[in-house]
Image: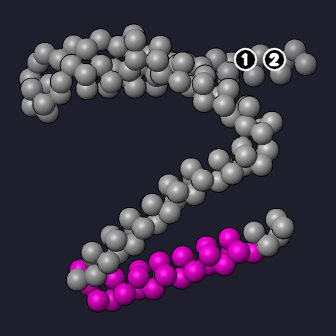
């Protein structure tokens, strides 16, 4: 079963690569008149990638519920992290930059929350590296 799926996916990937190569050659030989075609193809590839990225993990969770628990725990952890980071953010929106880009208080709070979550994840990554280095010395 897995071999059939892998073969089908290889064929589909080959077809997508072939169409992309043909569009690449046509774009560079015919010029800018094919820009829209190439952009539409890029949008199609992006949509397919987004669908596959969403659909296959859902199928995997349905087929293997035990692995779904760990994924769900990870998603809940990220949700808690983002909620904490969002609650730490201020909604400050005074100044010329905020007026220039028409940033509301809600947008400012969202941006601050995303920045806070980035800082927290970076700190956790550094702590994980330090822990890994120290724990490998004592083993």
Which of the numbered marks, if any, corresponds to residue 135? Answer: 2
Q: Which residues are magenta?
A: 7-32
Q: Does 13 lie within the magenta span?
A: yes
Question: Residue, x 66% and y 31% (percent of image)?
Answer: 72
Q: Main secondary structure of the magenta part?
A: helix
Q: Residue furthest front?
A: 62
Residue that mark 1 sits on: 131
Q: Nearer the viewer, residue 137 or 104?
A: 104
**Label 2 with label 1: CB-CB less than 8 Å:** yes
Q: Does 72 lie within the magenta span?
A: no
User: Is 43 on the left-hand or right-hand side of 50?
Assistant: left
**Considering the image in quadrants, where does the N terminus appear?**
bottom right
Q: Secondary structure at mark 1?
A: helix
Q: In this rendering, is residue 82 above or below 61?
A: above
Question: Residue, x 68% and y 71% (percent of image)?
Answer: 9
**Considering the image in quadrants, where does the C terminus appear?**
top right
Q: Residues within 10 Å of mark 1 (few under 14, many from 20)?
A: few
Residue 24 seen in the current view: yes
Give the quadrant of residue 70: top right
Give the quadrant of residue 40: bottom left
């Amino acid at each position: 079963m897995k071999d059939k799926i892998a073969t089908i996916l290889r064929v589909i990937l080959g077809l997508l690569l072939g169409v992309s190569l043909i569009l690449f050659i046509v774009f560079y030989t015919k010029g800018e008149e094919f820009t829209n075609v190439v952009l539409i193809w890029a949008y199609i590839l992006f949509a397919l990638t987004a669908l596959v990225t969403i659909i296959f993990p859902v199928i995997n969770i349905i087929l293997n519920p035990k692995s779904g628990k760990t994924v769900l725990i990870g998603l809940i952890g990220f949700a808690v992290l983002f909620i904490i980071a969002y609650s730490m953010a201020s909604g400050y929106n005074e100044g010329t930059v905020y007026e220039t880009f028409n940033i509301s208080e809600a947008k400012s709070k969202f941006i601050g929350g995303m920045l806070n979550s980035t800082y927290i994840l970076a700190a956790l990554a550094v702590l994980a590296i330090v822990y890994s280095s120290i724990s490998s010395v004592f083993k």
